[in-house]
Image (spheres, grey):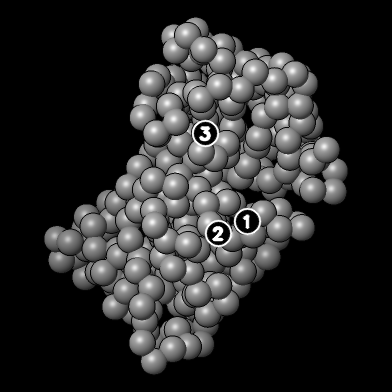
Amino acid sequence: MSPRAASKGAAPGSLRIGVDVGGTKIEAIAIDADGREQARRRIASPSHDYREIVDAVRAIVADLETECGQMARVGIGTPGAVSPASGLIKNANSTQLNGRRFVADLAQALGREVRVENDANCFALSEATDGAGAGHRLVFGVILGTGCGGGIVDHGRVRVGPNAIAGEWGHNEMPSRTEPGLPDTRCYCGRRRCIETFVSGPGLAADHRRDAPSGASATLDAAAIATLARAGDPDAVATMARFYERLAAALATVINVLDPDVVVLGGGLSNIEPICDEVLARLPAHVFSDTLATPVVRNRHGDSSGVRGAAWLWPA
Ligand SMILES: [Zn+2]
């Protein structure tokens, strides 16, 4: 049996429930076979207690099934990944999940097979299935939020890989060819100059503090800096220019290796209005090709992509 899909009884129907287990909230959606939303729930995540998280997922699934009047196939999106070697969760920023048999425990609690996948992979799957990447064979989905995740969907299926890290570009080193003076950032993963420390929301805000260390800039988050840049604030304009250039340089390393048919941007930073145009304008200088035919687009499903992708872990 795959460590990623444990079973204990089964009663599949056409209803799919996707659950996104985040650090601060648990969100769930029930969709029909055509992807139409049937019901939705959102609760605060039980803090720090692993058994409470499993119980909360069980309760939220039961609640949705009662409302919809049928049993569902259940997919779960989670930070981190299910280790192919051990079946345990690893790399999760919700650390109470790390080292747990989350798939098996959920299967037992729910009395059926469940599928569990990294939340960035769920995002990519959602957008590839019926979102901004629909109709494209190879989709690279990027989440630019509190962290920097990524997922690869090929022919409608998530690429996982033997280490369960496919798409995790955020902990590669930021290319510095066009920026020799790149700041020597430290990442929580223990490495230096990780892409995530530059193109995540906190990374962008930290960069602004480094370069414009006035009292006022110390409290600005990424959205506020982007707003200031649109208003013409020179420090914010400079910060955003560095952000776009670094994002383009980092994405180019993925495009050079994977050559995806489309790149879909998600996470809070994807809401910055000019991000797609700014990145597209800068990509050709970094990509090893005479022309650039790769669309870079904003996601379609927004905050719902995580739960929708979790539901689509059971493909049509
Ligand atoms: Zn890192």
Whichever of labels 1 and 2 marks the residue nearer the N terminus, that label is 2
> For residue 214, which numbered disc appears in the image?
none
View extreme (bottom): residue: 290
The answer to whether mark 3 is within 8 Å of ligand 1 is no
Picture layout, residue 291 above or below residue 129: below
Measured in 3D between alpha carbons, the distance from the residue under mark 2 to the one under mark 3, in whole angstroms, is: 17 Å
CA neighbours of label 3 inside 10 A, class few (<14), some (14 to 19), many (20+): many
Residue at x 33% of width, y 61% of height: 297
Q: Are marks 3 and 1 in contact (CB under 8 Å)?
A: no
Whichever of labels 2 and 3 marks the residue nearer the N terminus, that label is 2
> For residue 159, which numbered disc appears in the image?
1
Q: Are marks 2 and 3 in contact (CB under 8 Å)?
A: no
Q: Which residue is mark 3?
A: 311
Residue at x 55% of width, y 59% of height: 154
Residue at x 30% of width, y 63% of height: 275
Measured in 3D between alpha carbons, the distance from the residue under mark 1 to the one under mark 2, in whole angstroms, is: 7 Å
> For residue 154, which numbered disc appears in the image?
2
Whichever of labels 3 and 1 marks the residue nearer the N terminus, that label is 1
Q: Position of residue 10 (x, y in %)?
A: 70, 20
- Amino acid type at circle 3 is Ala
Measured in 3D between alpha carbons, the distance from the residue under mark 3 to the one under mark 1, in whole angstroms, is: 16 Å
Instruction: Let me know if residue 158 appears in the view.
Output: yes
Q: Are marks 1 and 2 in contact (CB under 8 Å)?
A: yes
Q: Nearer the viewer, residue 214 or 134?
A: 134
- Amino acid type at circle 1 is Arg
Q: Position of residue 60 (x, y in %)?
A: 54, 16
CA neighbours of label 1 inside 10 A, class few (<14), some (14 to 19), many (20+): some
The answer to whether mark 2 is within 8 Å of ligand 1 is no
In the displayed structure image, the side of residue 208 where residue 165 appears, left or right: right
- Amino acid type at circle 2 is Asp
Q: Nearer the viewer, mark 1 or mark 2?
A: 2
Q: Secondary structure at mark 3?
A: helix
